[in-house]
Image: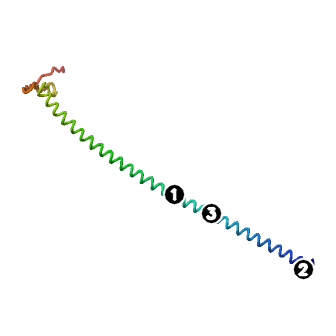
Amino acid sequence: MTQEEAAVFIQAWWRGTLVRRTLLHAALRACIIQRWWRQMQARRLEKRRRETLDSYTRDEWAAVRLQSWVRMWRIRLRYCRLLHAVRIIQVYWRWHICHTRGFIQGHYDIKENQLNLQLEISLGSQACRVQQCIALPIKE
């Protein structure tokens, strides 16, 4: 091998090394860019999944809340009807008790040194009203 052939061989080897190094750097940069792109795609996909899940959760909670309001409204309506029926029954029962057994009803009022007392005694169809003012002994 002559000196010129050896120089050409070394130059070819060096050019090949430079080309391989350049290709290696390009491949590494391409891998870095691909990895970054895949990370961005994964983040975007995760964000979209999270938004979809949040939307679904909001819709479910809205449906649950609406159902609970409807149940509450129906139960309240039923309760009000029952309460009205109970009050009607109580009124008729009290009227019946009042007219069959009698009752005592009254109130009092204390003013300064007097007791005002009003009583109504009812026995069947007969009624008696008593109103009395009683002086209270107050020591001064």
Q: Which residue is mark 3?
A: 36
Q: Residue 78's quadrant in the figure?
A: top left
Q: Nearer the viewer, mark 2 or mark 1?
A: 1
Q: Residues within 10 Å of mark 2 (few under 14, many from 20)?
A: few
Q: Name the residue at 89% across, 76% down.
A: 6
Q: Position of residue 2 (x, y in %)?
A: 93, 78
Circles 3, 2 touching at the beta carbon (< 8 Å): no
* Spatial separation of the CA atoms under disc 2 and disc 1: 66 Å
| SS assignment at label 3 | helix
Amino acid carrying label 1: it is Arg
Distance in Å between CA atoms under marks 3 and 1: 20 Å
The kind of residue tagged 2 is: Glu
Dot 3 or dot 1, earlier in sequence: 3
Q: Amino acid at mark 3?
A: Trp
Of mark 2 and mark 1, the one earlier in the sequence is 2
Q: Which residue is mark 1?
A: 49
Q: Residue at x 86, y 78 (%)?
A: 8
Disc 3 packing (10 Å; few <14; some 14–19; many ≥20)? few
Circle 1 — which element? helix
How packed is label 1: few (under 14 Cα within 10 Å), some, or many (20 or more)?
Answer: few
Viewed as shown, does residue 28 lie left or right of 136? right
* Gap between marks 3 and 2 measured at Cα: 48 Å
Asked if residue 13 is positioned above or below residue 52 in the image, the reply reads: below
Name the spot of residue 116 as percent of width and height, x first.
Answer: 13, 26
Name the residue tied to disc 2.
Answer: 4
The quarter of the rendered structure image containing the N terminus is bottom right
Residue drawn at (7%, 27%), measured in percent from left and top? 125
In the visual, does 109 lie left or right of 10?
Answer: left
Tell me if 99 is positioned left or right of 19 in this view: left
Q: Nearer the viewer, residue 67 or 123?
A: 67
Visible in this render: residue 135?
A: yes
Residue 111 can be seen, yes or no: no
